[in-house]
Amino acid sequence: MSSTVAEPGPAAGADEVPAPVRLLVDFAQALREEGLPVGSGDVLTYTRAMAVLRLSDVEDLYWGGRTTLVTRRDQIPVYDAVFRRFFLHEADRRPEPERTVLRAAARVVAELTVPQNDPGDEEQEGEQTPMGHVAANAEILRRKAFALCTPDELLAVRRMISAIRLAPPRRRSRRTASDRSGRRPDVRRTVREALRRQGEVGELRRLRHRRRTRRLVLVLDVSGSMSDYSRNLLHFAYSTRRATTRVEVFCFGTRLTRITRSLDRRRPDDALARAADAVFDWEGGTRIGDSLRAFVRDHARRGVCRGGVVVICSDGLDRGDPAVLADSMERLSRLCRTVVWLNPHKGDTVDFVPSTMGMMVAAPYVDLLLSGHDLRSLEDFAGILPTL
Amino acid sequence: MTRPTSVADLTERLRQERYLADRGLATAAYVALSLDRPLLLEGEVGVGKTEIAKVLATMLGRRLIRLQCYEGIDPAQALYEWDYARQLLQVRALSQHDLTDDGTVDRLYGPEFLVERPLLAAVRAGAGAVLLIDEVDRADDEFEAFLLEVLSDFQISIPEIGTVVAPSPPLVVLTSNRTRELHDALKRRCLYHWVGYPTPEREAEIILARAPEAADGLVAQVVASVTRRRDMELSKPPGVAESIDWVRTLQVLDEPELTADALRDSLGAVVKERDDLDLVLSRIDGVLDGG
């Protein structure tokens, strides 16, 4: 019954744009300037919506736009602010939030400093490498702790990280595919073929369940003690996200940020810069327990990691209450299939005993503790992943 | 039934069906009806997303067609399927003469052998239906893309029969619990509304609309208690549906007001997780008198 819908404004074919339409288009433009992805099609819907609502009513104006121009919950505050400024002529109330801007993570190598008391020190042979000398030998780079790499070496390492392809474990899907050795009869195909042969049932066709990859969730600690390490893992996250879409990436320091969408850029530099921008507390303190609790509350219980593998990368230096961490880990372990913890402090030690409070509290709920402090250990992780 | 003529009219008619919609939801639904666009509702669990589709169907005198999404749902379960067993029986029963007749095969793919699934039913019913696509976030991406195609032009082509086109599109309501982000393309097709928790006053009204015989005092206590519970960081915060259930439970138990004992006995109606139960019970005094 689309005939009942009025066209926006009188005689829309004329050269002159009616004033109300102009106003709405300008408003949409203002939203665009604030970064809301408003397409021309959306503006058209908006004007058509306002044609059936009352333009003079501020509430209709507000809700008409919100229902047609906003597509995600997190856009609502932006919409509200622009609406207030544009139609109510109010100044923005919220000051710009203070944020630590990280210059594009991918290009940040120049200011990368090696921590003084790095955990992996003792067993690393590459300590003496003179600065600026690029060790082209990939085998050496593989075994060198990230924290000890020179900027140039790090660039090379990051390129190699990007080449690692993660294959999350798979599970049986509800969808089916034709398969000779399948167990379930494929009634559809069998009957179709029988109809072709005038009702003569021939070979019984069979189905098997397809396999699907499990979800993979990366939760990266980007606090002060872990930030260098996490920048490398961000590359890891990016290449993983490119390889399979069933990956979610979160960062935390004092609070949790979901950066999955920021990683969906075509160019790695853009993606990483965006992801880094999205994280507010890069290099702030660490509240693992609170962050994981936020993860469980806002994401895990909605099913983000149900039946999936959760990988937490952190050194376990928690400034919060250990009880909160223990509780969150316990819940998390019940909401996903496997919990993997990557702790760079583990290094190459085989019988690593967690020494930080956070790590000790979390340990009972961790299915697998790996190091991931150098390229080779990340490759090991990629190798183990499909079997989890 | 006629279409509502304004947002206020729609709100009033929803109220007569005992559904209290706020201004935002009513506007979204009104625009969806007027522009024939699908309406996507996101929000917490138990805030009435599914309910509004049902109520709209009753209100408009339309048939409610529900497609419940789940992981692994495929087009055959959403569109149509041939009744293979019947087809086979039919063929076996044919005589030699029938088999040489050209029309036989066509008849085998006739409407009587077609098993209609929700989407086909909705396209056929057109404006006579409200199509509820529930929990679309649970279906996988491929299905979402397929859904986008159907929602774009409301036509379904069945190779053996031809294309079925909706005379006029049905009202489509999609709901999502945000277990994952939906595709932008799908969101673009839809009008979007976020359904939040109602204000305490509003929630009391909603409960009274659904459980009219409840005492005002009891409802106020329940609402206050539920509101505090939502701030308690429970892993499953109670929705409006839980509030309504709770009031009804208390009525069945014949409790005129919410005492500590009444709360202990009826907590299962609101708090549905072990850890949450422990948390609430440990603070039971605070829960009751506002702490």
Image (cartoon, rainbow, N blue to C red):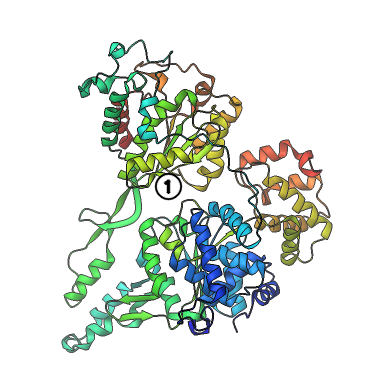
Chain under numbered label 1: A
The one nearer the camera, A277 or B141, is A277
In the figure, residue A290 lies in which quadrant? Answer: top right
- Above or below residue B56? Residue A173 is above
Q: Amino acid at mark 1?
A: Arg
Q: Residue furthest front?
A: A16
Q: Residue at x 38, y 80 (%)?
A: B165
Q: Which residue is mark 1?
A: A261
Graded by Cα atoms within 10 Å as few (under 14), some (14 to 19) or many (20 or more), the crowding at tag 1 reads some
Asked if A353 appears above or below B81 in the picture, the reply is above
- Between residue A142 and residue A66, name the one nearer to us: A66
State the SS at label 1.
helix
Q: In x, y percent, where is residue B269?
A: 68, 52
User: If the image is split into quadrants, where does the C terminus of chain A sit?
Assistant: top left
Res A184 visible: yes
Tell which of B244 and A88 is nearer to you: A88
Q: Nearer the viewer, residue A252 or A165?
A: A252
Q: Which x, y percent locates residue B179?
A: 49, 51
Res. A285 image quadrant: top right
Residue B273, position as x, y percentages in the image: 61, 44
Q: Could you say where residue B178 lies in the image, as x and y percent from the top left? A: 51, 53
Residue B45 seen from this side: no
Give the answer, above or below, for where A338 lies relative to A57: above
